[in-house]
Amino acid sequence: MSRTLIIYSTVDGQTKAICDQIQEICQAETQMVTMVSLEEAQAVNLSYFDKVLIGASIRYGKHRPELLQYVNRHRAVLNGKKNAFFTVNVVARKPEKNTPETNPYMKKFLQLSLWQPQQLGVFAGKIDYPKYRFFDKFMIRFIMWITKGPTDTSGTFEFTNWDKVKAFGKAFSER
């Protein structure tokens, strides 16, 4: 039975929801799965695991700085394992920006990261205006207006392609 670690960095919970789905897929393949937040991962011994998946969201055009610090610090151990990385962002709702080769946030991550993951994924996220505080609601609405996305602040808009998540999870579980 392989031991799998899933690490997530999320702001509003969509990245964790995606990780939950992938965790179910891995467990169905009789893998022992541990899932932790990026903050909790600081205390986890990576050498215990056979496989590591990291998922991270974008907020205001950037991954959290702790993400790059973590992967750069642990790149040698990560490289010695079966591994994968995915990013979650609303830009990926556009077909021309929803692959690792075309998504600007994935491209930026790969430029800045000393770790070069074996499997890459890009998933569109979710906008949940009613949950946001005033500043976030205003800024996200402005960004959506510029990029021709939804601007109705009373709505929730999920762009995640769950079939794509399942296919990614299945490919990762078979690694």
Image (spheres, rainbow, N blue to C red):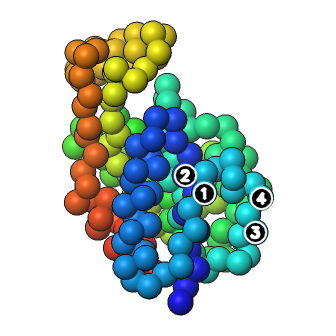
Residue 131 versus residue 124: which sits nearer the camera? 131
Contact? badges 2 and 4 (CB < 8 Å): no
Proximity of marks 1 and 3: CB atoms separated by less than 8 Å:
no
Mark 4–mark 1 distance (CA, rounded to whole Å): 10 Å
Residue hosting label 2: 8
Closer to the chain start, of discs 4 and 1, is 1
Residue plotted at (58% across, 68% down): 34
The span from disc 2 to disc 4 (Cα, nearest Å) is 14 Å
Q: Quadrant of the C terminus?
A: bottom left
- Residue behind mark 4: 43
Q: How many marks can you see?
A: 4
Identified by mark 2, the residue type is Tyr
Q: Which mark is residue 45?
A: 3
Q: Residue furthest bottom?
A: 1
Amino acid carrying mark 3 in the image: Asn
How packed is label 1: few (under 14 Cα within 10 Å), some, or many (20 or more)?
some
Q: Can residue 57 be seen? A: yes
Is 12 drawn above or below residue 100 in the view shown?
above
SS under mark 4? loop
Q: Nearer the viewer, residue 102 or 50?
A: 50
Q: Which type of secondary structure does the marked residue at label 1 adopt?
A: strand
Using a 10 Å C-alpha cutoff, classify the residue at mark 3 as few (fewer than 14 neighbours), some (14 to 19) or many (20 or more): few
Q: Nearer the viewer, residue 170 or 13?
A: 13
Secondary structure under the numbered disc 2 in the rendered image: strand
- Secondary structure of the residue carrying numbered label 3: loop
Q: What amino acid type should be assigned to the residue bearing mark 1?
A: Val
Q: Position of residue 15 (x, y in %)?
A: 44, 47
- Front: mark 2 or 1: 1
Give the residue at mark 1. 36
Vertically, is 11 above or below 175?
above
